[in-house]
């Protein structure tokens, strides 16, 4: 992964990851969701798999035979990877951001 050319410089990535973590923590706080340990190994250390200049997306296969739709049906997500067992979890970005925006209006 480190050799990928599109990766932003480490400082920008670190700041971006901190922003994402802060947004997710605020979202969990607002919704009352418990952000506890990994469901597989119990570890509470998650890596943010996100880039400042790119958006992670869950690609939704909707055509028969698994062909991608045109345009590709997708869902922007925040992706977290367990630092111990590599379990991957995702949170729908639109829902997180909508909840944060609604909270700012109050
Ligand atoms: Zn784990």
Image (cartoon, rainbow, N blue to C red):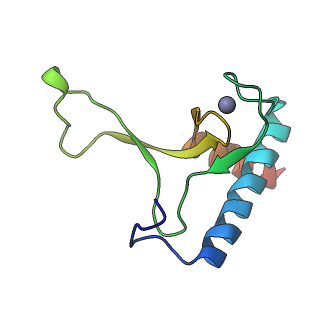
Give the percent coordinates (x, y) of residue 48.
63, 52
**On the picture, is 23 further left or further right than 48?**
right
> 78 or 98, which lies in front?
78
Q: Residue 33's quadrant in the figure?
A: top right
Q: Give me the residue at 74% from left, 53% from top.
A: 21
**On the picture, is 38 further left or further right than 9?**
right
> 47 or 85, which lies in front?
85
Give the percent coordinates (x, y) of residue 58.
42, 39
**On the picture, is 35 further left or further right than 65?**
right
Ligand 1 location (quadrant)? top right
Total marks shown come to 0
79 versus 21 height, above or below = above
Give the percent coordinates (x, y) of residue 19.
72, 62
Q: Give me the residue at 49% from left, 65% from top.
A: 2
> 7 or 67, which lies in front?
7
Q: Give me the residue at 67% from left, 37% from top.
A: 84
9 versus 73 height, above or below = below
9 versus 87 height, above or below = below
Give the percent coordinates (x, y) of residue 81.
60, 42
Q: Give me the residue at 78% from left, 30% from top.
A: 37
> 49 or 77, which lies in front?
49
């Amino acid at each position: 992964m480190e050799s990928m050319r599109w990766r932003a410089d480490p400082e920008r990535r670190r700041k971006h990851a901190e922003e994402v973590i802060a947004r997710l923590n605020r979202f969990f706080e607002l919704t009352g969701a418990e952000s506890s340990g990994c469901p597989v190994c119990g570890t509470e250390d998650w890596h943010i798999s996100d880039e400042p200049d790119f958006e992670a997306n869950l690609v939704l296969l909707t055509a028969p035979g698994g062909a991608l739709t045109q345009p590709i049906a997708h869902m922007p997500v925040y992706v977290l990877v367990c630092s111990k067992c590599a379990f991957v979890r995702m949170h729908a970005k639109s829902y997180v951001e909508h909840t944060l925006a609604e909270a700012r209006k109050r």
